[in-house]
Each structure stands twice: as C-alpha cells, then as structure tokens.
Image (cartoon, rainbow, N blue to C red):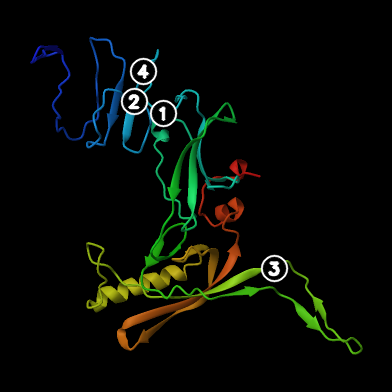
Amino acid sequence: MIFLGSMFCADIMSVTCTPTDINNITRIELSNGEYDDLRVTKNVTEELKATIPQEWDFDTIFHAKFNGHTGAGNVNWTFDTVSYLIVKRKKIGEFKWITLEAHKVQTVKDFNIKNIDITATPNCEYQYAVVPIIDGIEGFYFTANVHVKTRTLLIADRNEIWNTYITDNYLDNTSVVPQQTITTMYDKYPTIIRNTEANYEDIVVNAQFYPMDEEGCEIITDDDQQRINYNNSAKFFLRNGNTKILKGIDGNIWLVYVTTPPSDTAIDDYRNRKITFTCTEVGDINSEKDLFEAGLITATEEWWNR
C-alpha cells in the first residue's frame, strides 16, 4: 500500500485497512511476503498506533515477531520440551505458593487448562502462576494478579458450589480446645490437664436458599414446588458427607465438615424458610495436604511446596 499525494493506492496483495467483521476465525495464514510483526487481539476498541504494543493482556490472542521462528505466544517453551504444566497461587506480599493443579502434557490439547479455584480467600489479592516443568525443573513463572471478591455466603465441596445472598453472615464461632480442670485438696489453684493438640472452631451458619429466575436477579418464592425442590437439594448437599469450604461475605473462610444436621424452620410465613447448621473446622485452608485430602485441589504430594 502506498500514498501518492492525496491518493491512497493498494492492490489485491495489500492488507485491508477497513475494519472487517468476520465471526469464528479459527485460522490465519500469511504467505508470499516478508513480515516483521503480526498481533491479534480481541480488544476492538484499542487505539491504533504506529508502534505495536508489546505487552500481553487478557485480550491478546497471539503476537508473532518472526525473530527466527514462528512462535506467537508469550512463553519461551514448546510442546516438545514440557512434561508438565503446574498451576500455583500465593497471596500478594507473601512467599508461600500453593500448588493447585499439575497437568501432564502429552498432546497439544493438554496446554488448554480451565478450572475454578474455590479455595481462595475472599477480599484477598493473589498472584496465580502457570509453570512449565522442563526436564524435571521448574521453568519461568507466567503470572497474573487476581483480586478475589464475593457478595454471598458460599459453601462448596469437590462436586458442588452453593451460595446465597440471604444470610445474616454472623457465622458465630466457638474455639474448641479440649482440656480438663482438676482441683486438688491442698492447692489454691487447679491443675489444667491438656492431653491433645486439638484446637479448632465450630461455626454456626444461618442462611436461606431459594431458586433464582432465568436472569439471576430475583428469587422465586411463589412457586412452592420449585422452592421446595431447591431447598431440599441444598439440605441434601449439606449432609452428603463431603468436606467443604465455608466462606463468609466479609472474608472469613474455613475448611469444615457439617456436624449438626441442617434444621429447616419457618420465619413468620411458611415460604420464608431458614436453614441452620453447625460446621466443625477439620483442616487448614492453606494446607495442600488438607485441601488434597478433601478433594479440593488435584496436585499430588510430589508437587506440594515444603
């Protein structure tokens, strides 16, 4: 393409300068030319500049610079050199990483990783990293920062996630430290006997579970059968015997087991139902061992950070 005075000229070999709307692009081919740079982004509102941006963001699809190869990603490793991809996270400002997943790489499709991390603490900022394992050694960390937020009470296990806006969020908790007080005949003060290292919390939860409309904006209370089925499903989930994660709106989080079966009581009206249950803390939310045994992360012991 060339400019001649006020005239803009081009031929069939030129790249179009007019925005083109083509859906579901799955293949791009360049041929019969010399190319210095090719960048593809999903951000259609990005300002066009003479200098091509070098930074990667969530809208970047690929960026090929043709520096002796046709690689167009933001990593410096290939399918032939990577044996595993591991996913880690840590809180901003801390140094301890938790390994969430370890994916064995056998085909190109194994690079396509998608999962939900339900173990993160609300109202915390994390750094997530994807790390290649090359010849048994960790490669360069490719990271992104994520600020975790929630507006609901959430309780989840390895199979299901339940949440609700309708809660007092008190999450009243009692510390349990088993011990015994022995008063002897001639001593002014008692003797405290503690023969266990047990030190955990019991948490009381009050919440209401209602189905939502198709837009997810309004709760459904007038359809009794739908309301009853949803409420029963929530209670069945609470007593299914799986270890769970409990998260409050304010950032409280525990690894728990439901130890008091849920009670379902009416408040003023038979449709206004409150479910109350007690959870007992059974592990450390930041322990890879405890999270793995609960089925909440998939990384096995060989990938845990000691």
Residue 15 in the image: above or below residue 62: above
Mark 3, secondary structure of its residue = loop
Number of marks present in the image shown: 4
Check disc 4 and report its element: helix, strand or loop: loop
Identify the residue at horizontal 26%, vertical 26% (top origin): 49
Say if mark 2 contacts mark 1, CB within 8 Å.
yes
Question: How far apart in space, not on screen, are marks 4 and 3 (Cα)?
Answer: 58 Å
Say which residue label 2 marks.
63
Numbered disc in front, either 3 or 2: 2
The CA distance from mark 1 to mark 4 is 12 Å
Image check: 282 left or right of 33?
Answer: right
| Residue behind mark 3 | 198
Tell me where residue 255 appears, x and y as whole percent: 55, 62
Residue drawn at point x = 37 percent, y = 32 percent:
56
Q: Which one is in front, 211 or 108?
A: 211
Residue 74 is marked as: 1
Instruction: Say which element carries label 2.
Output: strand
In the shown orientation, is residue 161 left or right of residue 230? right
Q: CA distance from mark 3 to mark 1?
A: 48 Å
**Which residue lies at the image location 35% right of the left edge and 74% below the top edge?**
231
Residue drawn 60% across the image and 71% down it: 201
Q: Which residue is mark 4?
A: 70
Q: Position of residue 100 (x, y in %)?
A: 52, 46
